[in-house]
Amino acid sequence: MGYAVTVGGRRVDCADGQSLLEACLRAGVWMPNSCNQGTCGSCKLQVRTGSVDHGQSPLDTLTEEERSAGLALACQARPLADVEIGASAPARATHPLRDLTATVLQIADIARDTRRVLLGLAEPLAFEAGQYVELVVPGSGARRQYSLANTADEDKVLELHVRRVPGGVATDRWIFGSLSVGEHVRAVGPLGDFHLRAEDEDGPMVLIGGGTGLAPLTGIARTALARRPDREVLLYHGVRGAADLYDLDRFAELAGAHPGFRFVPVLSHEPDPAHRTGFPTEAFLEDVVSGRGWSGWLCGPPAMVEAGVKAFKRRRMAPRQIRREKFTPAQR
Ligand code: FES
């Protein structure tokens, strides 16, 4: 049966057990979202009429006072009646979230404990470079998030970079365990707001990725350079050691085609004379004197993302020009 959700004058059907966010995105109605796990708070909204079950909403993301004031996390809240919600940003069209069936085309070990997985789709997926998909882990029904390294026109073969999590149900047991070429995989996507917008078309860009946080930045950097081939784009990849680096040839080729593009690997724990040592945010501070007019993109572990925000602000980058995607541990 389900309930009706009204947002920005649009009415959306929400199936039983479906979150407000999923109902809206499936209907092609955008609302801010990032983690889809209740941890980032970007999907917080006002429930104007009706009531919701807050589900797994953590108290540090949605306090008791906020619940009493009618706020909810769209990614966690399920309607208990027809509801009208007021989003923090005007409703606009987005690529609809949908169920995907994909076939594993290739699994490649590309770095220490890191695999590239290529998934073939029967139907192309409409998305923006930088967004992610959730894979459904067979047997458990758990979903795990993987950013797409694709540009939007690479819409029939999805490229995922996967880092092994010791003991993880998705990586250790499945993607680094039983997963094989030819296997059918269930997924949903696209999700997330980490992508280029109309206002990002100008100015130099700096992108900093930690580990497999490189994946969405790969898609974003290639998209930006395809749109403006002479753009200044600095891409830093922070890893522990040289064994964790990958796609050096891909970025060397990109730099050959685009004189404004530079790829800078930075090793934090295992120095190597061929590469810079330290943290990528420090390397940015060494290299760039002023970030005024730049946009900054961060993807990786929370500590790296927070250090990046500080570094960008130190270089006078406007806060609204700073985009971030934190890798948060899976909650379910
Ligand atoms: Fe809902 Fe992050 S808390 S998308």
Image (tube, rainbow, N blue to C red):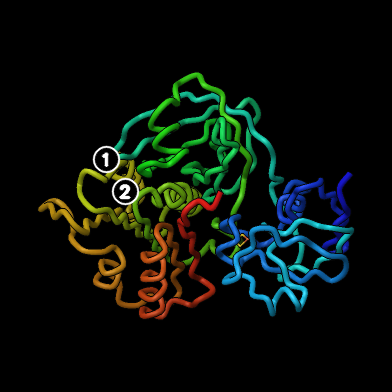
Q: Position of residue 298 (x, y in %)?
A: 43, 62
Residue drawn 81% across the image and 46% down it: 16
160 displayed left or right of 133:
left
Give the structural element (helix, strand or loop) at label 2: helix
Q: Is residue 112 above or below residue 224?
A: above
**Residue neighbourhood size for the residue with mark 2, other residues' Cα within 10 Å, grouped as few (<14), some (14–19), many (≥20):** some
Whichever of labels 1 and 2 marks the residue nearer the N terminus, that label is 1
Describe residue 26's horizontal placement relative to residue 299 as left or right: right
Residue 103, given in percent of the width and then of the height, sits at 54, 24
Residue at the spot x=50%, y=51% of the render? 330
User: Residue flagged by tag 2: what amino acid is it?
Assistant: Ala
Q: Residue 259 placed where, x, y %?
A: 32, 53
The residue positioned 48% from the left and 77% from the top of the image is 318
Q: Could you say where residue 39 lies in the image, as x and y percent from the top left?
A: 56, 63
Left or right position of 253 against 162: left
Tell which of 145 and 208 is nearer to you. Answer: 145
Image quarter where ligand 1 lies:
bottom right
Question: Which residue in the protein does label 2 denote?
Answer: 255
At label 1, which amino acid type do we have?
Answer: Arg
275 with respect to 34 (left or right) = left
Q: Identify the residue position indicated by label 1 in the image.
A: 112
Q: Residue at x 42, y 38 (%)?
A: 171
Say which quadrant the N terminus sits in: top right
Give me the C-alpha separation between circle 1 and circle 2.
Answer: 24 Å
Against 50, is 243 above or below? Answer: above
Instruction: Name which quarter of the figure residue 107 lies in.
Output: top left
Which mark is nearer the camera, 1 or 2? 1
Mark 1 surroundings within 10 Å by alpha-carbon count, few (fewer than 14), some (14 through 19), many (20 or more): some
Residue that extends furthest to the top in the rendered view of this protein: 182
Q: Secondary structure at mark 1?
A: loop
